Image: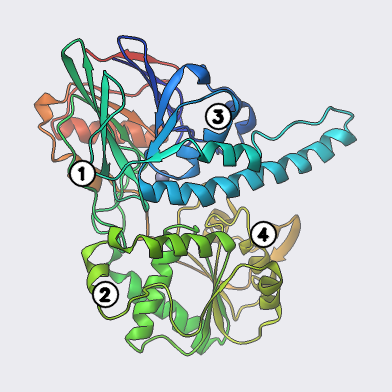
Amino acid sequence: MNIKFLGATETVTGSRHLIITEKGKQVLLDCGLYQNKGSDNETLNRQLGLNPSEIEAVILSHAHIDHSGNLPYLVKQGFAGKIYCTPATYDVCEILLADSAHIHENDIQYLNKKRKAQGLDPLKPLYTTKDMERCLKHFKPIPYDTKFTLNDEIQFMFTDAGHILGSAAVNITANEGGKLTRLCFTGDIGRSHDLLLKAPEKFPQADYIICESTYGDRLHEDAIGAETRLLEVVTKTCVEKKGKLIIPAFSLGRTQEIVYTLDRLKNAGLLPDIKVFVDSPLSTNATDIMRRHLSALNEKVQEYLKTDEDPFGFNNLVYIKEAAESMKLNSYQQPCIIISASGMMEAGRIKHHLRNNISDKKNTVLIVGYCPPGSLGRKLLAGVKEVKIFGEPHKVEADIEEIASYSAHADYNEMMEFLSCQQKDKVKQVFLVHGEDGAKIAWKQHLKENGFNNIAIPEKGQLFKLT
Ligand SMILES: [Zn+2]
């Protein structure tokens, strides 16, 4: 079996790895979009580095767009096989890929206006809603811990990776003329003690591991104090300052974590009597999906469900889908909490809420997610006095607070804990992907110190023969 690394090599986006068996069968692990700030993602996403019609199947680790977002383009370019993922990943892909298609359609309109002014020909979007709908027909959900025979050479099984709803590590066994090769692709690895999700599951012994590296150089803050911290910020903003608390949050994962925390505070009688708005159609849909998969959540949530059957709903909590309802929040004068997407504050309705509230010192912006360098969130954390939103300057008068303990990615200790189910001397090689250079180098060092040998950091396009 050979493996060719086609994406997420130099960056944390564009996950795409190609398996080629001895008989020449090709199976693709993930088909994500490049989403790097400041790079030519449009070109990178169109260069697949493979022939889609020759790919027999795609095995998808999870629904995040940097892992699934280029699937509609793959289908559009001639891929005719099945896309295997867990049932929850399929549900999440339905909404995330629809959102992604919308973004591509809108972005291209904007780009083409500019091109027209420059006398250039218009471009077509990477894919459209129609392409996305065609792509969804190729999906075939397979539950966790179920061995699936793909062909006479390849069998695989998903194990829970605990990163987002439905996320999986992909465990492949190749049988090439009687020679067995076991490969684990970790996908993205979740936390050992996630608020909602189960801890990453032990996975079968592998000969080769393709491992993510996002936080290979980082240890997270302890999450135990997050609930208390959130209550402190709510009390200070909504009771003492009588202002609005604006929380930018990812639609899937972080939004439900915050809502669940507020639900717990409400049931404990600690939450002040204020309205809480989740203002994002995507977040509302993602919450509904999580409600359909409550059994996928961890033991603590299962315990909580015995006393409260909806951990994402309480009196005073309002989910907003319609734009008109969202706009009404601009004139809402009472203290309240507004949770909106996107988490990085680069797109979505959150930008409107920031524009309307950031210059009033009664208000607070609470940052609960990773903000990459150059993003609006990072600037606010750095304490800038003025920011540009929709091209207009706005004075930063609101308090800026942060709770840094929320994360969907394991830190290096948690990743090591995840790998501890392996007999290290049996692992022939570990390939590090999905990380910035510094994180990969640090993670390689930690792995070596913990007894893993032969660790490779593949370059884009590099081919490895798994012996
Ligand atoms: Zn992910």
The residue that label 4 is drawn on is: 387
> In the image, residue 154 lies at what x, y percent?
27, 23
- Label 4 to label 3, Cα distance in Å? 40 Å
**Quarter occupied by the C terminus:** top left
Contact, mark 1 vs mark 4 (Cβ under 8 Å):
no
Identify the mark nearer the N-term, 2 or 4.
2
- Label 3 to label 2, Cα distance in Å? 42 Å
Identify the mark nearer the N-term, 1 or 2.
2
**What amino acid is at disc 4?**
Val
Q: On the picture, is 281 further left or further right than 166? A: right
The residue at 58%/40% (across/down) is 132
Mark 1 lies on a secondary structure that is: helix
Can residue 206 be spotted in the picture?
yes
- Label 2 to label 4, Cα distance in Å? 41 Å
**What amino acid is at disc 3?**
Val
> In the image, residue 461 lies at what x, y percent?
45, 17
Q: Which mark is residue 304?
A: 2
Q: Which mark is residue 75?
A: 3
The residue at 45%/64% (across/down) is 287
- Label 1 to label 4, Cα distance in Å? 40 Å
* The CB of the residue at mark 4 lies under 8 Å from ligand 1: no
